[in-house]
Image (cartoon, grey):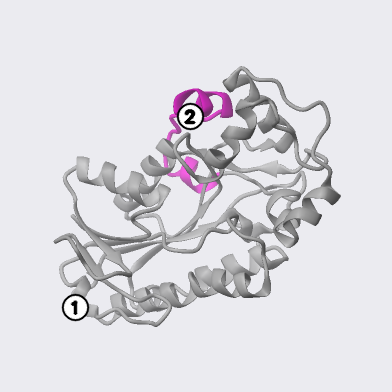
Amino acid sequence: MTIAVTGSSGLLGSALIESLRGAGAQILRLVRHCPQNPDEAFWDPAGGVLAPAVLEGVDAVVHLAGASVGDHRWTPEYKRKLLASRVPGTRTLAKAMAALDRKPRVLLSGSAVGFYGDTGDRVVDESAPAGKGFLAGLAREWEHAAAPAENAGIRVVRLRTGFVVSGHGGALGRMLPIFKIGAGAALGSGRQYMSWISLPDWVAATCFLLANEGMSGPVNLTAPEPVTNAEFTRELAKALHRPTMPVPAPAFALRLALGEFAQEGLLIGQRAVPRRLLDAGYRFTHPTLGEALAAVL
């Protein structure tokens, strides 16, 4: 297969490309700079620029591009950037795919479990409606932007990704230095659920979805056993053989330091399960958090 990938330099994209190339796939990386290698092609997601001819001969597209949710305080300007880095680019890509005579067979388009908003203790699968809040609205618009490809008869899978457990970057990579000095702590009440997935399982599940022609629509890329923030804190400290702080980080202090991101990104959570993956026969390599941390740390 020839597979086009956006967001190819990120944690998920780089790991996926390594796996796909190992399986013999040809990769076309859509990049925002002047192409410097034969496997690169230019596109401008924010400006809506992607010549359909770039995708000639492509069998599948994996769309992962988007500004990081947790790297900056959510000022009005940065919230606009989060939207602009996801919605117009997804629409541009979907329209370019739809315009081809020989269309790619499948689009795997990024999304997030933030789609469900705050679920509290309630278990949700892919049949649950969108929740409330900025992240839920962002995910809803992000997913809807892929409609032009879907309307053209292309199989579209929406990847609702949870917290990715990897020792080489991402949110966990930013947490590790704090936990390694014994300063890790639960956040707020610690009762908010975290829907997580190991990086190896994320890659394997994405490859599974590329190959499984019966899968379309939303799919939760999360492990079968979500954990509370307090449980995650204990498991991570145990894996690193370090203590944790005796008291949790106060919610008011997190809100003061991080603003709206603290409320939606840290103090509420989703108890999402991968019902469709499991029903389709995918078997997780790391079904529990302890196994995932042992594998990646």
Q: What residue sits 81% from the left and 26% below the top?
A: 246
Q: What residue sits 38% from the left and 78% below the top?
A: 92
Q: For residue 142, which numbered disc appears in the image?
A: none
> In front of the other: label 1 or label 2?
1
Q: Which is nearer the eye, 155 or 198?
A: 198
x%, y% of residue 259?
A: 75, 60
Q: Dot 1 corresponds to which residue?
A: 53
Range drawn in magenta: 274-297
Q: For residue 286, which numbered disc appears in the image?
A: 2
Q: What residue sits 78% from the left and 50% below the top?
A: 254
Q: Residues within 10 Å of mark 1 (few under 14, many from 20)?
A: few
Q: Is residue 127 above or below residue 153?
A: above
Q: Amino acid at mark 1?
A: Ala
Q: Amino acid at mark 2?
A: His
Residue 100 in view of the camera: no
- Identity of the residue furthest to the top in this view: 241
Image quarter where the N terminus lies is bottom left
Residue 68 on the magenta span: no
Mark 2 secondary-structure assignment: loop
Residue 55 in view of the camera: yes
Q: Which is nearer the eye, 130 or 294?
A: 294
Q: Is residue 172 above or below residue 43?
A: above
Q: Residues within 10 Å of mark 2 (few under 14, many from 20)?
A: some
Q: Are marks 1 and 2 in contact (CB under 8 Å)?
A: no
Q: Quadrant of residue 123?
A: top right
